[in-house]
Amino acid sequence: MGAEHNLELLMVRYQQGDFAAATSLIERTSPQLHRFFTMQQASRSHAEDLLQETWLRIHKVRHTYRPGEPALPWFYSIARHVRVDHYRKTVRITEGERELEVMSRTTAPRASDAGRGDGLDALLAPLSSSEREVIEMLKVMGMSLDEVAWATSSTVGAVKQKVHRAYRKLRIKLSGSELRKGRSEELP
């Protein structure tokens, strides 16, 4: 709780014009936010662009932060909106390209996303992006159900439902891999 409380104090100081506090906030939370984007995007440079856009947006709306509220979910909420806005923009561009019959291979989703070399990415591959998002916030970032609900603009019940569905998919995937592994060991 102490580290999060420090984030809240830094955010209040940032609102009051203390740009050293802003620097400290960026240094403390950027690695977590970058990981949030890399979990959802194919390239690290793309995630860096989204991170930069997030900090620009945080700077613009810093006056909307309410002192006493948890700062980390507030940051994640903004990051999530940046990601959604980026996705919508990408879809519009792609649809426009289709209309012009100029399909770009770089805007197509990459099939190799699950095989980026990161075991966690491979494990979470069967999950939807919203399920991955809540699992990452809860288990990787250590946020509470209330904080995840606040950051994703949903209810605690909706978060619990997404987590339950994600766990069920992961159990199926893991039991399937163990069955395949067990069968291959039984073969002569």
Image (spheres, rainbow, N blue to C red):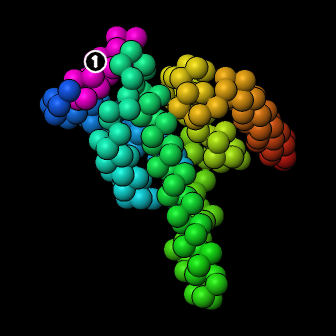
> Looking at the picture, does residue 24 appear above or below residue 35?
above
Task: Say whether residue 14 is magenta.
Answer: yes
Residue 24 shows up from this direction: no
User: Which residues fall within the magenta stretch?
Assistant: 1-15
Relative side of 4 to 25, left or right: right
Residue that badge 1 annotates: 9
In the rendered view, tell whether residue 102 sits above or below residue 162.
below
Q: Is residue 96 found left or right of 28 in the rendered image?
A: right
Front residue of this view, candidates 175 and 132: 132
Dot 1 amino acid type: Leu
Residue sitting nearer the eye, 150 or 188: 150
Q: Quadrant of residue 45?
A: bottom left
- Left or right of 114, for residue 167: right
Farthest residue in the top direction? 2
- Is 93 drawn above or below residue 172 in the view shown? below
Residue 6 showing in the rendered view = yes
Residue at image point 64% right, 82% down: 98
* Label 1: how many Cα within 10 Å (few below 14, some 14–19, many 20+): some
The image position of residue 175, as x and y in percent, is 80, 35
Residue at 16% across / 29% down in the picture? 18
Quadrant of the image occupied by residue 63: top left
Identity of the residue drawn at 17% across and 31% down: 17
In the structure shown, which secondary structural element does the residue marked by tag 1 occupy?
helix
Q: Quadrant of the N terminus?
A: top left
Q: Nearer the viewer, residue 24 or 111?
A: 24
Q: Residue furthest front?
A: 63
- Could you tell whether 183 is left or right of 145 in the image? right
Q: Main secondary structure of the magenta part?
A: helix
> x%, y% of residue 132?
62, 40
Outermost residue toward the bottom? 101
Queried whether the magenta region covers residue 39, the answer comes back as: no
Q: Residue at x 29, y 41 (%)?
A: 59
